[in-house]
Image (cartoon, rainbow, N blue to C red):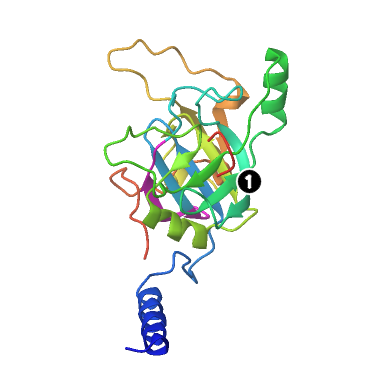
Amino acid sequence: MSPIRAFVILISLLALSACGQKSKFRTYDGPQVTRVVVYKAEREMYLLHHNRVLESYDIGLGFAPEGDKKIEGDGRTPEGDYLIDRRNPNSRYHLSIGVSYPNDEDRAEAKALGKPTGGDIFIHGRGPRYQKGAPRDWTWGCIAVTDREIEDIYAMVQNGTPISIYAQKPVVVAAPAAELAAGDAVVVQPTPAPDAQVAPPSPAPSDVMPMDQLPVLSLGPDGAPLAATPVADAQ
């Protein structure tokens, strides 16, 4: 076989191999994702179109998942309100979208401790170095999903989308729908531990949220969520 013929065959094989590889960049033309909500204790993340769930995911967190992130290197995932503000198509973790941590409150807390806030908080995949059987919470504070899931998230969630990260899901106590006018307030309280003595409800304004700002999912008649419709360095 002549060298030229061998070269042509090699190029053809490489082209066929490339054609067989699926792109990690997907397209999305569904309803706009208007908000991302994360509940850390439940390890759940939701993509919402207003109060409608578009997608939900099981997630991994930082290697020290309990508590709010305070300083650089503490292994915690931050809690608070942020924006999706950047994306990395060449992430070592397949794909990633950035969270705008730290905010002003985070900076003030870290300054009071005399420590740096850290940064580079992302929602990302696992990447080629992820080992099967690794701990569920394995990042330096980022939110981790599978590579297949981050492909969809990367396509669906645009820069500028608000993201709220909560320690846990709230419990909603409200009057019957017929008695609750639009914009009325509902009381949000954490779930009490079994057999715990529950103190009387606090009148503090922080426990009351307007309906249109309540960070919970739409609930059906049975109280269940409605079904969805069809690290240390830069990530």
SS type, badge 1: strand
| Magenta span includes 104 | no
- Mark 1 closeness class: few <14, some 14–19, many ≥20 residues within 10 Å: some
Residue labelled with disc 1: 83
Question: Residue 57 in magenta?
Answer: yes
Specify the segment rendered in magenta.
48-60
On the image, the x and y values in percent for residue 92 come to 49, 48
State the residue at coordinates (37%, 50%).
Answer: 146
Q: Nearer the viewer, residue 111 or 213?
A: 111
Is residue 54 placed above or below 107 in the rendered structure? below
Quadrant of the rendering where the N terminus is positioned: bottom left
Percent from the top left, x then y, of residue 213? 57, 43
Measured as percent of width and height from the top left, residue 156 is found at 50, 61
Q: Nearer the viewer, residue 62 or 15?
A: 15
Amino acid type at image mark 1? Leu
Q: Is residue 7 above or below residue 187?
A: below
Residue 188 position (above or below residue 212): above
